[in-house]
């Protein structure tokens, strides 16, 4: 991973030029906020031209040897991963924002699976 701060720090990834945004992490189909594309589109863009969007290509670089992906990391799969409806909070924000990382959980409901309103 390239970011040193916890999720929501607004750090910019030097590899893809994505600005860390909690709203877009929680609702990855959210257009607006810190980034022009939504997170799902940015991941697709990265596969096509190695940046979160085409105009950011000049600001990117390859990942360094000491910046490996987490072994379980994978792009968001809308058919597998169940995020909250757009701009609807089904649970309070988790204290540990890394719980929003979809790739770390086998349960496709992520951090909300233990929340009981």
Image (spheres, rainbow, N blue to C red):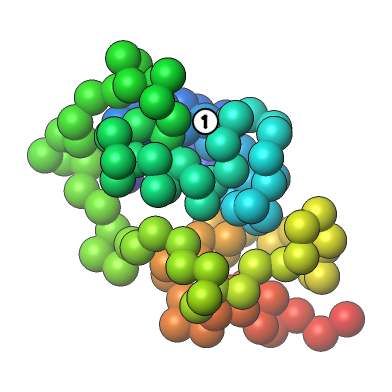
On-image quarter of the C terminus: bottom right
Q: How many labels sit on residues?
A: 1
Q: State the residue at coordinates (61%, 74%).
A: 82
Left/right placement of residue 78 relative to residue 115 reads left
Tell which of 15 and 5 is nearer to you: 15
Tell which of 85 and 105 is nearer to you: 85
Look at mark 1 in the image and give the residue it sits on: 19
Tell which of 36 and 94 is nearer to you: 36
Based on the displayed image, in which of its 4 quarters is residue 38 positioned?
top right
Residue 52 picture location, percent across and down: 42, 34
Q: Is residue 56 above or below residue 99?
A: above
Helix, strand or loop status at disc 1: loop
Is residue 109 shown to the viewer in this render? yes
Residue 14 picture location, percent across and down: 33, 26
Estimate how packed mark 1 is, as few (under 14), some (14 to 19) or many (20 or more) residues with alpha carbons within 10 Å: many
> Residue placed farthest to the left in the image?
65
On-image quarter of the N terminus: top left
Q: Is residue 21 above or below residue 76?
A: above
Residue 65 picture location, percent across and down: 11, 39
Left/right placement of residue 33 relative to residue 35 reads right
């Amino acid at each position: 991973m390239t970011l040193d701060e916890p999720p929501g720090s607004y750090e910019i990834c030097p590899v893809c030029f994505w600005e860390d945004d909690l709203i877009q992490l929680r609702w990855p189909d959210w257009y607006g906020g810190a980034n022009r594309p939504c997170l799902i589109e940015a991941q697709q863009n990265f596969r096509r031209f190695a940046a979160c969007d085409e105009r950011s290509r000049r600001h990117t670089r390859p990942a360094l040897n000491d910046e490996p992906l987490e072994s379980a990391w994978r792009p968001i799969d809308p058919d597998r991963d169940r995020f909250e409806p757009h701009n609807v909070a089904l649970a309070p924000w988790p204290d540990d924002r890394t719980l929003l990382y979809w790739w770390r959980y086998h349960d496709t409901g992520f951090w909300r699976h233990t929340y009981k309103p």
